[in-house]
Amino acid sequence: MFNQRTILDVQNIRVEFRIEKRKTLRAVSGVSFDIKQGETLGLVGESGCGKSSVARAIMQLPPPTSGRVLLEGDDLTEVSKKQLRQLRPKFQIVFQDSISALNPRQTIGAAIAMPLHIANNGSRSEQKFMVQKMMAQVGIDPEYYNLRPFELSGGQCQRVQIARALMTNPHLLICDEPVSSLDVSVQAQIINLLEDLRCRYGLTMLFISHDLAVVKNVCDRVAVMYMGKLCEIGSSDDLYRFPLHPYTEILLNAVARIEQPRALSDAQTDVMDSPFPAGSPPGCRFHQRCNMKQGICSETEPEMKRVRSDRWVACHVRE
Ligand SMILES: Nc1ncnc2c1ncn2[C@@H]1O[C@H](COP(=O)(O)OP(=O)(O)OP(=O)(O)O)[C@@H](O)[C@H]1O
Ligand SMILES: [Mg+2]
């Protein structure tokens, strides 16, 4: 279905934070995936599992502690600062908190023009023309050019972030929880906009969310993350219909319960209470919460194994 050209190849990245003098928090413990041209990969997992750390490591803000991030073959962790600056227009990110991601003192026109300004692309009037054209494409009235972020709604600010990210024709767009700070009705509008832009520009995207329901209609493939590692990856159709990893099942059950509201069950509150990733238990990271666990699960960490074409799972029981 996709052009097989790989745009992003993330190889075994680790992200560690020094939290106290001798203490290190492992936010990401060896994550690998790739994204083909025109494909959207969803990255899903509960709060604190390391999704934003993966996004920031890809953006080199800051670079991962170890591992490689190849963008169209260029290893972003290896290139010089100058080369990285030249490559930056090719990979852009849209953050979760739409209003605080924008400078309150800057007009939205200036915010969207910023990437053109940095790249020294066009005269002022040409830049204004390009910005207003992009504003129209993302559904913001070009008359709003001189307004400031606080004069816009959350959804409109998110459209400004998207416009700014698209000004450089990025080859990869990372959306880190792009709708989770917005009202449900506005969420749908922004998702529709991203879908529309994706078709129009043939965008390649990494779409991050803690909610499997949000990524369902947007992503071609989904990677499920738990405590700093991927536990399952596969095409959306297959993964939603036949979840393999017990954690993916819990996430999907939580989605089903939200679609038919009921009192919170233990399993659901379990999903919301994320464990702290610093002291991961031996064996499978999920075994303490898993109702299918066997002896091996508390002893040996499962490797990611291919169960069928394009379907991978890290589980001793389900592999
Ligand atoms: N700069 C930092 N310094 C120390 N710890 C950090 C830092 N950034 C993130 N962490 C920790 O790393 C872990 C992963 O955080 P991260 O923000 O990547 O999770 P997330 O999956 O994006 O969560 P959320 O869904 O809430 O956005 C968390 O335990 C978090 O507290
Ligand atoms: Mg995050």
Image (tube, rainbow, N blue to C red):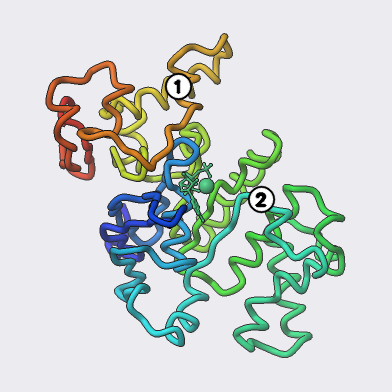
In the figure, residue 148 lies in which quadrant?
bottom right
Whether 86 is drawn above or below 29: the answer is below
Outermost top residue: 263
At x 52%, y 36%, the residue is: 214
Tag 1 secondary structure? helix
Residue 252 spot, x, y in % from top left: 41, 25
Say what amino acid the circle numbered 2 marks. Asp
In the figure, residue 102 lies in which quadrant?
bottom right
Which residue position is annotated with label 1? 270
Whether 259 is drawn above or below 138: the answer is above
Quick one: quadrant of the C terminus? top left
Residue 223 appears anywhere in the view: yes
Q: Earlier in the sequence, mark 1 or mark 2?
A: 2
At x 57%, y 9%, the residue is: 263
Say what amino acid the circle numbered 1 marks. Asp
Label drawn at residue 58: none
In the figure, residue 128 lies in which quadrant?
bottom right
- Give the Cα distance between marks 1 and 2: 25 Å
Q: Nearer the viewer, mark 1 or mark 2?
A: 1
In the figure, is residue 315 to the left or right of 33?
Answer: left
In the figure, is residue 110 to the left or right of 193?
Answer: right
**Count of labels in the image:** 2
Label drawn at residue 97: 2
In the figure, is residue 228 to the left or right of 98?
Answer: left
Residue 165 spot, x, y in % from top left: 59, 66
At x 28%, y 16%, the residue is: 291
**Front residue (pair 313, 274):** 274
Residue 183 spot, x, y in % from top left: 71, 36
